[in-house]
Structure formats: C-alpha cells, structure tokens
Image (tube, rainbow, N blue to C red):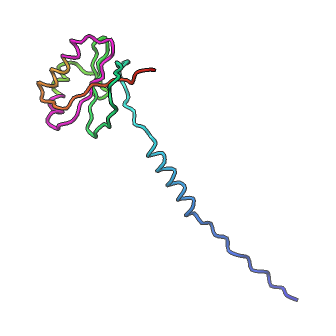
Amino acid sequence: MNFRRPQREQLELNLIPLIDVVFMLLIFFMLTTTFIHNRVLDISLPTADTGTEQEAPLQNHVVELSAQGTLALDGELITVEELAKRFEAIAQRDAQVVLWADAEVINQRVVTVLDLARRAGVSRIGMGTALPVN
C-alpha cells in the first residue's frame, strides 16, 4: 500500500499581466484627460467664426474680465493696479497671456487690460473666444 500523499502542484500567482493592465489604464487616462482652467468669474466668451484652436504653452496666464469689470488672473481675483505689477513679472519670463473677456464687456475695459500688458512689456497676448453654435 502506498501511504504517500500525492504531491500538489505549487500555485503561483502571476502579477505581471495585472500590472501591465494597470499601466495601460494609467496611460489611457493620462492621454485622454483634458486640463480645464478653473474659472473664477462667470464669463460667456464671444464667438468667432475664424478663430483657431491653439495649444496652450506651459507658462500660459489667463486674465478673466467679467461684464461688470471684475478682473481675475490665474484664478485669483485682482485689482487693476495688482494686474499691472503681475504683468511686469510675466513680461520678464516672456510668458503668454490669454484674455478671456465676457461678450458683454465694454470695449474700454478690454483696451485698458491690453494697454497694461503693453506697458509692462508683455509681447505675447491672445484673446479667448468660443466656437460658434451651428
């Protein structure tokens, strides 16, 4: 009689395929994620038929201008005097500024912000617009 127990095969848990799947999911979500700028002010951008979508550079600063004249820079409420000082620092780094002005804003307020940028030496400034609704 054979009293020996049959030897069991050693079970081995292979984690490599699981790690591969997790990395593929991580890469997928990193590539499909959109980075949205958090707006401080409630702004409805004007539409432009000829506007082009451009890729934002790494040092992109956003100035928001509401219809009431409230200003925000990079998500922080700011006064006109503070904006002039910040524009000087932005000009030294040669960073780009994008102006998001409400569609109902008075043109003089937009021109004032553009003049502040020009006086401070900001050379790269753009206007944010929305795509037209068909």
Horizontal side of 76 relative to 116 (left or right) equals right
Placement of 15 over or under 82, stated as above or below? below
Quarter of the figure with residue 103: top left
Quarter of the figure with residue 44: top left
Quarter of the figure with residue 43: top left
Q: Residue at x 53, y 59 (%)?
A: 19
Q: Nearer the viewer, residue 7 or 22?
A: 22
Q: Position of residue 128 (x, y in %)?
A: 31, 25
Horizontal side of 109 relative to 13 (left or right) equals left
Q: Residue at x 22, y 19 (%)?
A: 79
Which residue, as the protein is rendered here, is positioned at the far right?
1
The magenta stretch is 86-111
Residue 34 lies in the magenta stretch: no
Quadrant where the C terminus lies?
Answer: top left
Residue 96 lies in the magenta stretch: yes
Q: Residue at x 46, y 42 (%)?
A: 32
Q: Position of residue 127 (x, y in %)?
A: 27, 25
Q: Residue at x 55, y 64 (%)?
A: 16
Placement of 88 over or under 25, stated as above or below? above
Placement of 78 over or under 121, stated as above or below? above
Q: Position of residue 117 (x, y in %)?
A: 16, 25
